[in-house]
Amino acid sequence: MLEGRRILLILSGGIAAYKSLDLIRRLRERGASVRGVMTEAAQHFVTPLSVAALSEEAVYTDLFSLKDESEMGHIRLSREADLIVVAPASADIIARMAAGMANDLATTTLLATDKPVLIAPTMNLQMWAHAATQANVALLDKRGILRVGPGSGDLACGEVGSGRMAEPLEIVAVIESFFHRSTQLKGRRAIVTSGPTHEPIDPVRFIANRSSGKQGHAIAAALARMGAETILVSGPTVEPDPAGVRVIRIETARDMLAACEASLPADIAVCAAAVADWRVETPPQQKLKKEGSGAPPALKLVENPDILATLSGAGNRRPRLVVGFAAETEKIVEHAKAKRARKGCDWILANDVSPATGTFGGDSNTIHLVDGTGVEDWPALSKSDVAARLAQRIASYFDAVKAAE
Ligand code: C5P
């Protein structure tokens, strides 16, 4: 799968560096060559000798080493790769990347490169949740830096939460989908809905929900990476626009439907938005006043259009593959099957949001994919890994369609 691909693997300081040794093996098993760069901190966790032995390449550590610079040099290091992978990516190297610093070989290489970069963050959960880290990661996301993880679980520091480095095989899956990005869905057009909708109560108030748009945006990014012409119809969210995606911003469910219909024809529709089920029938032109109004106003709600069901029933304009989501807390597969039939879509990604899974408010999703043939159970994955896996499955679906044509 990765025959002939050249990966520059940058290890920064984190206990998860031991997993990067396995990552080297997994990449090489698939035919990739791996060249290692280590920060000083990384060398406290694993040795350059281990990286050299597994990669069967020289390992570079020092910006000012006469030997390293004469042998290779940071500019060549950064250019003689098809992809740079930073794993583990510590809070520190993420901050230095965001700031554009070049104070060691790893960051100088990252600043000098013209190649795509994938980071696999790992750190303590508080460090991950810190506003500084979140701002740095958002900036890197915006710059088109690819990211896998972090996932949730037991952390080496003894705490439990978000901050685990993605497993080597998950990183390999993202690398594989990256290398197949520009071919597999080339020529296909995708519409993705994401985020909440805002339904006005009056000119200043609205009904909304807590959807972040993370999952829908990640799916749009993953489809675009695989070469699909991707249109993201998004409700209000703070998520940055994914690279290479056309974003149409809307507020209400009716606007979302109109934008989707105007974007047809399409081959793929993925409805990941949390569309408000109801809207206020006739929002007043002026702000509702508390003073002198007596009783609180009664809001008359009417049902919003169902975008997933409308696209699924769009006759000869129906996208070939229509995918919906279902958040369930019990009888997950049974409910998802019923929803698939009711909406008329092809696949339902049922998300287990029962309290035991920690999905609500967390970063990971536990998906059961229901299609016409049965159910596929996915392990708990980060939202970006769910997106990569879904995009890969969509690509396989269209490969099969092509083969049958
Ligand atoms: O009916 P329910 O809201 O549980 O269905 C969820 C699925 O339907 C999601 O894929 C969501 O994006 C989609 N949906 C929609 N338009 C609506 C309501 C839900 O596209 N009005």
Image (cartoon, grey):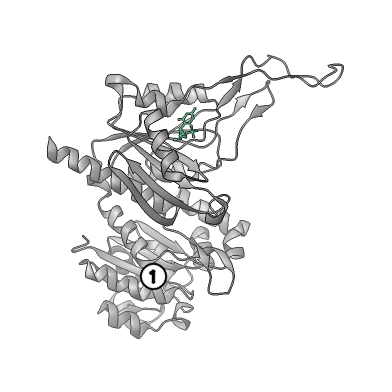
Q: Residue 57, relative to residue 287: is it above or below?
A: below
Indicate the position of residue 123 as horizontal and vertical percent values.
53, 68
Answer whether residue 10 is visible to the viewer in this image: yes
> Residue 32's spot in the image, x, y percent?
23, 67
Viewport quadrant of the C terminus: top left
Whole-percent x and y of residue 161? Answer: 56, 63
Residue found 35% across the figure and 22% down from its top? 313
Left or right, 111 with respect to 163, comes to left
Q: Residue 281 versus residue 131: which sits nearer the camera?
A: 281
Q: Position of residue 78 (x, y in %)?
A: 33, 65
Query: In terms of image quadrants, where is residue 319?
Result: top left
As drawn, 237 above or below 169 = above
**In the rendered image of this protein, does residue 132 appear above or below residue 107?**
above
Left or right of residue 362: residue 232: left
Q: Nearer the viewer, residue 27 or 61?
A: 27
- The quadrant holding residue 43 is bottom left
The one of 8 and 236 positioned closer to us in this rendering: 236
Which kind of residue does numbered mark 1 sit on?
A: Ile
Q: Is residue 220 above or below residue 80?
A: above
Residue that badge 1 annotates:
10
Identify which residue is drawn at 27% across, 68% down.
27
Number of marks in picture = 1
Disc 1, SS: strand
- Label 1: few (<14), some or many (≥20) within 10 Å? many
